[in-house]
Structures are given as structure tokens and as C-alpha cells.
Amino acid sequence: MSYSLPVLGSKKTVEAALPESVNSHVLYEVVRWQLASRRRGTANTKTRTEVAFTGKKMYAQKHTGRARHGDAGAPIFVGGGTTFGPRPRDYSYTLPKKVRKLGLSMALADRAKDGKLMLVDSFKGVNGKTKEFVAWLADNKLENQTILLVTSDANIVRAARNLVGVRVLAPEGLNVYDILRQEALVMELSAWEGLQARLSPAKTEGGEA
């Protein structure tokens, strides 16, 4: 389906070919994959061999009238090791590239159909100052919503990065999770053109996808 994306600060629009329907399950799978890849997996507990206790047997095995015990680091004692506790692990897994591309296309389509995907040819009047960017948001009626700003301009990044409702990403870092977290998506026109190449199907040497 073709969407007409507005270019802020001008009367022109850009036609974008994006999916007509949005499959929530595809978006769920991509977001789940992203969050799993971001998990550090550093949760760790000590076993009985790692806790700081002497390995000496507590008392004799027999003839005490008490239960048999080994050292004080056994899991049944307070301060002893943990049985089957979490250990460092890698939570990431693979997801087909076609599914990742489809998820990104659908996330963009979801914003486009609501008129929340906007392009910018130039940030007129913004030269690195936060107050200048706040004024630019007001001029474009974007001040009362959360925004995902995709830009590679260092001045724009410096001007927008301290605002609570604005998340700034480099064009190559655009992802489904961050798109869905923010109400509006604002992209540089050059970043959009690069994104189209990223989403286009790969071609074989014979010229077929």
C-alpha cells in the first residue's frame, strides 16, 4: 500500500510503499527477539562450592544423636549455597531476517496510517540549542507527544537528547521496539531514503529477489 508521508516545513509529500495490514503477532515476535538480545544475562548465585565457608565437616558422622551434615555451606543452612539458582547465560536467539524486515515495515505502516510518521528535509532554526528544538516542535505542533527522532545531524542530536519526551536514534539504529514505544516518528529525509534500501528485498546475481 502507498502512504503519503508529510515533509515538515514544506507542502510536499513523499510516497512510501508499506504493508497495508499490520500483524500484531509479527510485531510481538520481533520485539520479543529484540528484548531477549538486550538482556545481559548476568544473574548469578553461588553454589555450595563457592560460598565463603570452611569445608570442614561440622561434627562426626555417627554417635551424636543428630542429623548427618557435611560443611556449613550446604544449601539447607542460612548463608549456604543456592541449589539450582540462576547462572550467567545468553538469552539471545535467532530470528529470520525476513521476519525482522517485515516487522520493521509493519511498525512504520502502523505509524504512517495514523499520520504519525513524518519526514524532515531540514530543521530550520535549530543550531544545537535545546530551546531552539523546543520552538521547532511547537511550530510543527509536536510538543505534546512522545517522539522518536531519527537523525545523524550532531547539532540536532545535541539539541534534542535532553528532552524527556524525545528519544534520539541514529538511522542505522531504527528498530521496532523504539518505534512502538513512542507516539510519533520523525525522520530526516536522507535517513528515510537509506531505510528504503535497507527494507528492499535482497537481489540475486540474476536480478531476482
Image (cartoon, rainbow, N blue to C red):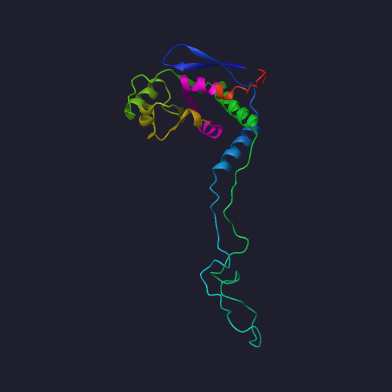
Residue 17 is a magenta residue: no
Residue found 58% across the figure and 43% down from its top: 36
Which one is nearer the viewer's eye here, 94 or 29? 94
Task: Please state the horizontal and vertical placement of residue 158, each as a whole percent of the image.
Answer: 36, 31
Task: Please state the horizontal and vertical placement of residue 186, each as a whole percent of the image.
Answer: 47, 24
> Main structural element of the magenta stretch: helix, strand or loop?
helix
Residue at the far bottom: name it.
63
Which one is nearer the viewer's eye here, 106 or 114? 106
Residue 195 is a magenta residue: yes
Residue found 57% across the figure and 38% down from its top: 34
Residue found 48% across the figure and 28% down from its top: 171
Is 117 drawn above or below residue 11 in the view shown? below
Q: Work out which quarter of the rendered image holds the C terminus and state it.
A: top right
Say how many tags the image has.
0
Q: Quadrant of residue 4?
A: top right
Residue at the far front: name it.
205
Is 73 drawn above or below residue 140 in the view shown? below
Q: Work out which quarter of the rendered image holds the N terminus and state it.
A: top right
Which one is nearer the viewer's eye here, 124 or 97? 97
Instruction: Identify the magenta region.
Output: 175-196
Task: Please state the horizontal and vertical placement of residue 115, each as a whole percent of the image.
Answer: 52, 21
Task: Please state the horizontal and vertical placement of residue 88, each as a whole percent of the image.
Answer: 57, 54
Q: Quadrant of residue 43?
A: bottom right
Residue 79 relative to residue 156: left or right: right
Residue at the far top: name it.
11
Residue 17 relative to residue 168: left or right: right
